Image: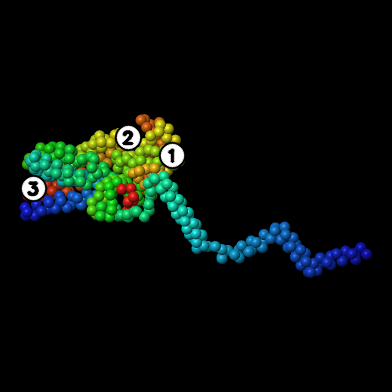
Amino acid sequence: MIKARRNIGFHLLLKSRFWVIFLFIALLFAIRWTKGAGYLDFYSILLKPILPGTAQREWIKEGENIERSMRLKLLEEDNIRLRKALSLKQLNSDQRISAAVISRSSRNWWQLLEINKGAKDGVLKGQTVIGPGGLIGLVDSTTPLTSRVRLLTDPGHQVGAWIDRTKQHGILTGMGTNRPKLIFFNKKPLVKIGDVVTTSPASTLLPPNLTIGIIQFVDAQALPSPYAIVQLTASPEAIDWVQILKNNG
Amino acid sequence: MAKNKKKLLIFFTLVCLPAFLIISPDWLKINGITPCWPVIVLLPFSLKNCRWRSIIASILLGFFIDSFTITNASYIPSLFLLSLVWSQYGLHNKKIELFLNIGLMAIFGAAFVGLSIWAQKIFIYSSLRNNWFHSWSIYILISEAIITGLVAPFFSSWLLLAYEKN
């Protein structure tokens, strides 16, 4: 009797259908235990060739850029409205004159650029000249067809500057090098290396909020007044085209 | 022949000199700094001409060169003094194949002009009385003197020959 029972047990193991059912149940358990990981992995491998590629990434980026530019436009409009309310100077992007650099003397005793737009095109002495990166200088003199731009780096050239983080004013003075000196009015300037220097939002001579450079070195103990060395964001040595802002003439 | 040389001198002074000043070609620069052109032009003229003519030429040349710069410091005082010294030195039957001599005089001339502009800028702008500006001025002064010394033997001796033949 006992022998017969043993035969029955082993007989089941030898049948192929048993193993098929066993494996099927094991598979089900495995799927349940891994929460369908195998299926998901397989699906992701299958989907890989048709996943969002570089083109789609560019579409997304383009969409983001459009969204940003719309936001910027809204903010600019808001800014103009508020500046009007406060009777402050405005930066109007429509009143710009593009000009090519026809002569460059950016490392001599006088650091200047000659550009191919002059009084005939509405350029006036004292107008602001910007390039890719921010402010590069002011118009020093004009002829009917050309203008001479005095660079921020020219020794002795002084313009007002503003540090937005600390809300402090200073005078940016050209030293001949690519790094002008920012002289502070306060005895404790509180600036740090890496602070952005811009034109003053309340300036009556220069358009507001134009980027000038980044602070590279600070001497808070200097006498008679503390100073910082500013690395300009616009490099006059590499600029071939500039824009003259008409609204501060 | 003499007439042709005169034309050549006028051409160099009125066309080539402003062209060099405005275009400032890269192949005539050292560390981005151009030669001191007024020294190159004034040197042969002062060597060949009398004191009064040299002084007048230096003042006129100074006015001319100042029109290409931003009006603060001027070339006139330094060119005036250089014209006095060079006209006094003169040629006096010296051999003009002193090729290096011209270069040396140009180096000293450029250094003197540079020093004069440096001093004027310090006098005009009190904010420049610090180390940052001085390091930059030394850099310009040395570069300008070197490039002027290299260029002068070619241009100045050529102009000097033209004055001699005139």
Mark 2 vs mark 3: same chain? yes
The mark closer to the camera, 2 or 3, is 2
On the same chain, marks 3 and 1? The answer is no
Q: What is the chain identity of the residue bearing mark 1? A: A
Instruction: Give the structural element (helix, strand or loop) at label 2.
Output: helix
Of B54 and A85, the residue lying toward us? A85
Outermost residue, right direction?
A: A1
Alpha carbon of mark 3 to alpha carbon of mark 1: how far? 66 Å
Amino acid type at image mark 2: Asn
Identity, as a three-letter code, of the amino acid under mark 3: Glu
Q: Position of residue A49 (x, y in %)?
A: 56, 65
Residue B15, label in figure: none
Marks 1 and 2, how far apart at CA:
28 Å
Instruction: Write down the quadrant of residue A121 in the picture.
Output: bottom left
State the residue position of label 1.
Answer: A167
Identity of the residue drawn at 25% across and 40% down? B141
Of labels 2 and 3, earlier in sequence is: 2
Q: Residue at x 25, y 50 (%)?
A: A142
- Determine which residue is flagged by label 3: B164
Residue that numbered label 2 is attached to: B131
Residue at (41%, 44%) from the top-left corner?
A86
Q: Chain of mark 2?
A: B
- Colour scheme employed for the rendering of this structure: rainbow
Looking at the image, can residue A114 be seen? no
Q: Secondary structure at mark 1?
A: loop
Q: Position of residue A46 (x, y in %)?
A: 61, 65
Considering depth in this image, is A123 or B38 the residue closer to the camera?
A123
Q: Residue A16, can we see it?
A: yes
The residue lying at 23 percent from left, 42 percent from top is: B71
